[in-house]
Amino acid sequence: MQDILTLAGANLLTPTILCFALGLFAALARSELTIPEAVAKGMSIYLLFSIGFKGGVAVADHGLDARLVAALVAGLVLSFVIPFVAFGLLKAMTRLSATDAAAVAAHYGSISIVTFVTGSSVVQAAGLVAEGYMVAVAAAMEAPAIISALYLASLGGGRAEKIDADLWREILLNGSIVLLVGSFVIGMVTGEQGMARIEAFIVAPFQGVLCLFLLDMGLVAGRGMRNSKGVLTAGVLAFGLVMPVVGAAFGLAAALLLGLSTGGVALMMVLAGSASYIAVPAAMRVALPDANPSIYLTLSLGVTFPFNLVIGIPAWVAVAQAVGG
Amino acid sequence: MQDILTLAGANLLTPTILCFALGLFAALARSELTIPEAVAKGMSIYLLFSIGFKGGVAVADHGLDARLVAALVAGLVLSFVIPFVAFGLLKAMTRLSATDAAAVAAHYGSISIVTFVTGSSVVQAAGLVAEGYMVAVAAAMEAPAIISALYLASLGGGRAEKIDADLWREILLNGSIVLLVGSFVIGMVTGEQGMARIEAFIVAPFQGVLCLFLLDMGLVAGRGMRNSKGVLTAGVLAFGLVMPVVGAAFGLAAALLLGLSTGGVALMMVLAGSASYIAVPAAMRVALPDANPSIYLTLSLGVTFPFNLVIGIPAWVAVAQAVGG
Amino acid sequence: MQDILTLAGANLLTPTILCFALGLFAALARSELTIPEAVAKGMSIYLLFSIGFKGGVAVADHGLDARLVAALVAGLVLSFVIPFVAFGLLKAMTRLSATDAAAVAAHYGSISIVTFVTGSSVVQAAGLVAEGYMVAVAAAMEAPAIISALYLASLGGGRAEKIDADLWREILLNGSIVLLVGSFVIGMVTGEQGMARIEAFIVAPFQGVLCLFLLDMGLVAGRGMRNSKGVLTAGVLAFGLVMPVVGAAFGLAAALLLGLSTGGVALMMVLAGSASYIAVPAAMRVALPDANPSIYLTLSLGVTFPFNLVIGIPAWVAVAQAVGG
Amino acid sequence: MQTHKAKRVEIIIEAPMESRLTAALEKAGVTGFTVLPVLGRWTREGQVGRSGMVAVVCLIRPERLDALLDAAYAVVDRHIGVIGVTDAEVLRAERF
Amino acid sequence: MQTHKAKRVEIIIEAPMESRLTAALEKAGVTGFTVLPVLGRWTREGQVGRSGMVAVVCLIRPERLDALLDAAYAVVDRHIGVIGVTDAEVLRAERF
Amino acid sequence: MQTHKAKRVEIIIEAPMESRLTAALEKAGVTGFTVLPVLGRWTREGQVGRSGMVAVVCLIRPERLDALLDAAYAVVDRHIGVIGVTDAEVLRAERF
Ligand SMILES: Nc1ncnc2c1ncn2[C@@H]1O[C@H](COP(=O)(O)O)[C@@H](O)[C@H]1O
Ligand SMILES: Nc1ncnc2c1ncn2[C@@H]1O[C@H](COP(=O)(O)O)[C@@H](O)[C@H]1O
Ligand SMILES: Nc1ncnc2c1ncn2[C@@H]1O[C@H](COP(=O)(O)O)[C@@H](O)[C@H]1O
Ligand code: NA
Ligand code: NA
Ligand code: NA
């Protein structure tokens, strides 16, 4: 426990977290500080490319782990299953309609890649090395939750759109999956040689770019909080704090079953405990248009994301060390 | 004098200044070369973040200087007072209306953060070390001049808008103040440890980013010059060249009173001698809409900014060395 | 031949080429992955600035080569002449109208700066050093082809606009010429000292930025291919594969006449064999509006650019080594 | 100058629905349209991908209006957004 | 398809005034509006922040036009910019 | 609120022609116009420079419409793009 608090404290005073806090402050104080949309997208492309490539190179270095396929399957299963858990919790804790609850559940079954990126850098700062293929697991966990959620919504009487060919393509080939898997494969194919060529670009400036990106995340989350006053009841808010812990527990169980390294355990908890705010909201607008975006976006971006950044990630790392060491 | 010329010569042939010149040339020759707005904003966010953070780390390293508070107060006073001087000079040298003169005066009481950034790199290249808190002084000097100017405008019979709560917030929490102060605090809190994490991002590429940013500044200034032919009378133009010298003299006096280091003296001159072209113009559009933006933008960006870049900064550094050494 | 294949193979498995392939794949699979326009422009400005500056520094280092002027003249001549060759080939191989054929011919007389940038990095990876002034030659080759093409179009009865003062300015001062020549001059003037200041920005991250830029090129080329199904007949397609070889042969001849270094020979082939997709299409929209942009853009960006990237560049480098060594 | 009667339809719609809308318009025989970006509100739903709202503007012959509106309505139906129609005139009727 | 009479108001205004305008519109009971970016002229007044002009487009019921124009006019009054009104029709009147 | 009759002209044109069009408009006595960006299709023709299409919106007095259309038509003529005209009303006629 002491360890966890110390780690959490150390994590709080890093430039990355403080940049997120600065963004939150600026937005809540209604400063007009903004980062242009195009620049924010550019940074997110950089982060995805970098994390994918590094994962691929790590796999090229250490050889293909027998557990890769098992880990991918575990990720898929988690993403399919967690929405049911989330839906159950929401039904118990809140008065959300079946449609809204299903939409929220989709977000928690899927993952937040920025949480994963931040988690990776905390894992690394703690001196741990995770399996390189965890980025592939992250990609695998993006989409399945959407299917579970649409099933839940239609069960609940909601008018979910059929998943037509277009929607399938949008879900499975959404930008972050393609970029993450693509750069992972490129890293795997080009290995250390490829890394040597572009290391100065994707490794050295990474933390700094992450700082500015989290500044933007803080601004976006803060503006969301301001605009959605009154949207979240106490029950919904509580869900946003409880669900990442529940998700992380599922992640822990899966990771232990798989026998991942300590770093891998931490990252699996980070993934399972995180909530999507990019791919899933877009899919929900198309497939569950009646669900209220203020609810799921505020929950995912305004409650669970900061919780994971500040408390979740350092806690999961500490848990992984306790369990693994 | 010889020294000043040599330094000015050396300063002229740096990539940064030449990039500004290239931008000016391209715009005046009506080339369609442009840097996207979003990219220019992104670079300016990078520069502000970097300079603020480095200032904070410097303060963390050297401990809080007793003069910090005195320097902040001096900055506030300079920003309040210089508009009155500028207004007097304008009334003597030009036929601008009271409203236009007040708007121009606001720009010269406030500061140009890019001039400050360029000044910092010249100070550093001269082997000097300035007080890290000068970035906080810069932030403190952004806003007070606006209040003086609105007072001057209403004295002169102009219809200045009341500064309502919204306008106060916009002035005091404008993007560059929040980012500069925020990153300064983050640098101070995380110190050398934080620096180690993001150094590769905020230190090494700094000069190069500044080059491309000044290229854009040259393009913007050049386009402004082209579009405002005939706006500036000889008197107004002369003001744009005299006022930075006057402002720098005030800065010198304040810096000597404070007992700043040689680098600090130079930067205080740079700040006091520079004219805003970001925060103040936006505030003037809201609070003094009858003032002509062509006048104040062309003066600040098309006359005083290049003057400071090419002549002012190297001169102030030489003066600071003469006085300080 | 063996050499060429090995080199081509090595070239294929670099992060840069694989990123281009990833972009192509994503676009053809209709993923919604996109790189914001502003970010793509920002990267292209970075690449142009970097390559121009490095060329200038190289010239400053090795002194002005007597062949500089000769090489510039050769570049101008090639750019003037190649459109006639291309036009003849098009008339023989395809049924394009005179206007369309002239527009296509203009693209092949001009150059693709990204192909040149990629070529430079392959040349460097092969351990060769090219003349620094090749970037000036690249700039010189951008525009003349346009004039030849308009002449060809009017010969063929097409309604080419007169090249008025505005159009001349747009052609001669187009963004990439100004940036390339400007940064070349800045590099020449500031030399190694200037390089030392901004090296961390323009050298180290170069390959990585090129990766993301080629990812975007792949996306753009792939979307173009999808949208122009049926535009290209077999003859037109064949032209897009034959013409770069013909152009490169002209480049080889010129380079041998000039007595360039092995690296210089390779780059001259790259330039002559490449096709514009930035400056020339914009000029054609103004001057030859009746020409069909789908034809020339798909050819240049969708056929010849990938061909050069994957096959052309490594082949020309191998040829240059065979001829030079 | 000779002008021809037309209708100007302006559809403000969520960006993730844009491709569905334009596909429906093309199916309904619309020969051209222009998509304008809309300045974002908070819902920045796709940082790699699509986000916010867009405005689709379409000038068409009056007799085709109903087909267009039917097609657009089928897509927009359950989604947020606005459909507005104005009387207009166009030059160069051969392009519509 | 059933349409309803409406007015389309288009206000082109300096970006630093945008939030004041939209606040005034909301006060005047306007239920929705769309903000479009305008391509900059020189006055790049806020490199970190807001800049240039924006276009605010608003479809409203005709009977609310005057309230809207009064509110908009009070904000725009001394500022550069343009206010234009067009007759229009909208689908889905329940959203206005 | 007092309004004045006007025409709203909307010209959608290739970006490389923008400066030619606006120069022609200014020559024809147009006192103001607004340029809106258009979301790109494939023809990303100028990665350093200009690209795609733009929309030029112009509110003018009805009696000036013909001069404007003539000027615009001379520029657009052989180029792709659209010119649409709508009846409108403006506030502050002194600005037109
Ligand atoms: N009917 C239309 N309504 C609105 N915009 C159009 C229309 N037709 C063409 N456009 C615009 O003009 C551009 C060129 O179209 P086109 O002239 O059909 O090749 C398109 O990209 C659209 O932005
Ligand atoms: N009356 C309106 N006039 C113009 N745009 C509107 C209007 N109502 C809604 N919108 C646009 O449609 C989007 C969704 O609004 P709503 O349907 O009210 O949730 C808003 O962000 C606006 O861009
Ligand atoms: N007649 C007009 N039609 C359309 N937009 C205009 C018109 N006049 C002015 N504007 C817009 O309002 C801004 C300020 O113009 P002005 O009020 O003429 O200084 C311009 O940049 C245009 O965007
Ligand atoms: Na999850
Ligand atoms: Na000042
Ligand atoms: Na060529």
Image: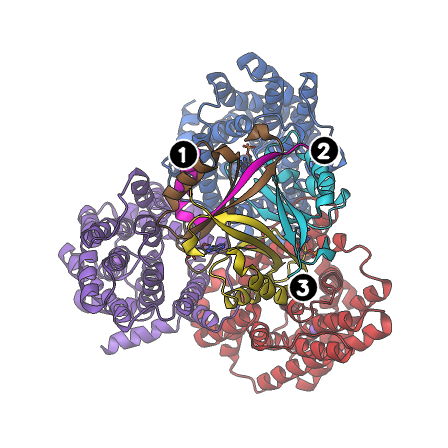
Chain colours: A blue, B purple, C red, D cyan, E brown, F yellow
Q: Amino acid at mark 3?
A: His
Location of residue B256 (image quadrant):
bottom left
> Where residue E28 sits in the image (x, y, percent)?
42, 33
Q: Chain of mark 2?
A: A
Q: Is mark 3 within 8 Å of ligand 1?
A: no
Q: Amino acid at mark 1?
A: Leu
Q: Nearer the viewer, mark 1 or mark 3?
A: 3
Residue at x 51%, y 25% (from the top left corner): A319
Q: Nearer the viewer, mark 3 or mark 2?
A: 3
Q: Is residue E82 left or right of residue D71?
A: left
Report the disc number at residue F79.
Answer: 3
Q: Which residue is mark 1?
A: A12
> Where residue B160 sits in the image (x, y, percent)?
26, 49
Res C3 visible = yes
Residue at x 28%, y 52% (from the top left corner): B138
Residue range of the region highlighted in magenta in the rendering: E1-27
Q: Which residue is mark 2?
A: A69
Q: Chain of mark 1?
A: A
> Where residue E35 sits in the image (x, y, percent)?
50, 43
Q: Amino acid at mark 2?
A: Val
Ligand 2, seen in the image, is in the quarter at top right
Query: Label 2 neighbourhood size at 10 Å, few (<14), some (14-19), many (20+)?
Result: some
